[in-house]
Image (cartoon, grey):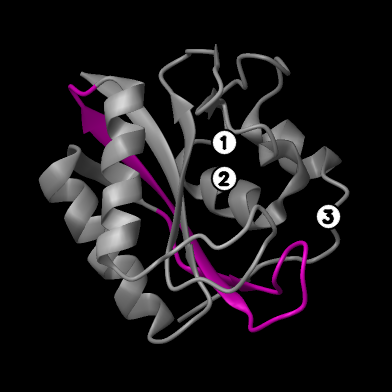
């Protein structure tokens, strides 16, 4: 079984409901959800829009990374997400693979670890709840250290 960390976000509709629906779909289609962080609210990153709700989860899965990516894209599409451009935009659901065990993958369709983890407090803060001592396999720093060094000034706020 592989350990896969995901970031899930939403800034349209019932944000927490959509995040929970995505988690349920991941648990059924991809693998057992082992841990969930709290949900955090942050401003949109890279564009001006509604605030996002974000969460990180740990999943144990027998699936290979490319198959997980295909299943994520299907979940997003089935939940109503349609990518119109390569630019950031509002979305009912956004699911990213952050880490897959200790693997480093750099293909045309998939980069693992996610290439912008260290830039995003909305990922690092919930990851701190799950695994503060996880070492980024490329940067060779823990999640805790990456969060301390992160230049993103938008501190996520825990949603009750």
Q: Earlier in the sequence, mark 1 or mark 3?
A: 1
Per the image, label 3 sits on a secondary structure element best described as loop
Q: Quadrant of the N terminus?
A: top left
Q: Is the C-beta separation of discs 1 and 2 under 8 Å?
A: yes
Task: Please tell me which residue is depicted at 35% across the width and 67% down the height of the picture.
Answer: 19
Question: Is 5 located above or below residue 14 in the figure?
Answer: above
Segment colored magenta: 37-63
How many marks do you count on the picture?
Answer: 3
**Residue 54 lies in the magenta stretch:** yes
Per the image, label 1 sits on a secondary structure element best described as loop
- Within-10-Å neighbours for mark 2: few <14, some 14–19, many 20+: some
Q: How far separated are the C-alphas under marks 1 and 2?
A: 4 Å
Task: Please tell me which residue is depicted at 50% across the width and 49% down the height of the picture.
Answer: 129
- Within-10-Å neighbours for mark 3: few <14, some 14–19, many 20+: few
Q: Earlier in the sequence, mark 2 or mark 3?
A: 2
- Residue annotated with mark 1: 132
Q: Is the C-beta separation of discs 1 and 3 under 8 Å?
A: no
Rendered image: mark on residue 152: 3
Question: Is 28 located above or below residue 61 in the figure?
Answer: below
Q: Could you say which is closer to the camera, residue 132 or residue 27?
A: 27
Question: Is 52 located above or below residue 5 in the figure?
Answer: below
**Residue extending furthest toward the left:** 28
Q: Position of residue 26 (x, y in %)?
A: 23, 49
Q: Is residue 119 shown left or right of residue 158?
A: right
Task: Please tell me which residue is depicted at 74% across the width and 32% down the height of the picture.
Answer: 145
Q: Is residue 95 shown left or right of residue 120?
A: left
- Residue annotated with mark 2: 128
Q: Could you say which is closer to the camera, residue 125 or residue 99?
A: 99
**Residue 58 lies in the magenta stretch:** yes
Q: Position of residue 114 (x, y in %)?
A: 59, 33
Q: Is the C-beta separation of discs 2 and 3 under 8 Å?
A: no
């Amino acid at each position: 079984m592989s350990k896969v960390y995901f970031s899930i976000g939403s800034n349209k509709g019932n944000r927490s409901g959509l995040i929970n629906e995505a988690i349920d779909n991941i648990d059924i289609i991809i693998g057992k959800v082992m841990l969930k962080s709290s949900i955090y609210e942050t401003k949109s990153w890279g564009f001006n829009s509604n605030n996002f709700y974000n969460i990180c989860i740990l999943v144990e899965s027998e699936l290979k990374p490319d198959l997980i990516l295909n299943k994520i894209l299907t979940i997003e599409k089935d939940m109503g997400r349609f990518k119109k451009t390569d630019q950031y935009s509002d979305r009912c659901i956004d699911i990213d693979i952050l880490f897959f065990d200790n693997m480093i993958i750099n293909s045309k369709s998939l980069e693992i670890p996610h290439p912008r983890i260290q830039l995003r407090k909305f990922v690092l803060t919930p990851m701190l709840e799950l695994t503060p001592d996880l070492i980024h396999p490329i940067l060779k720093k823990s999640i805790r250290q990456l969060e301390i060094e992160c230049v993103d000034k938008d501190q996520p706020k825990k949603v009750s």
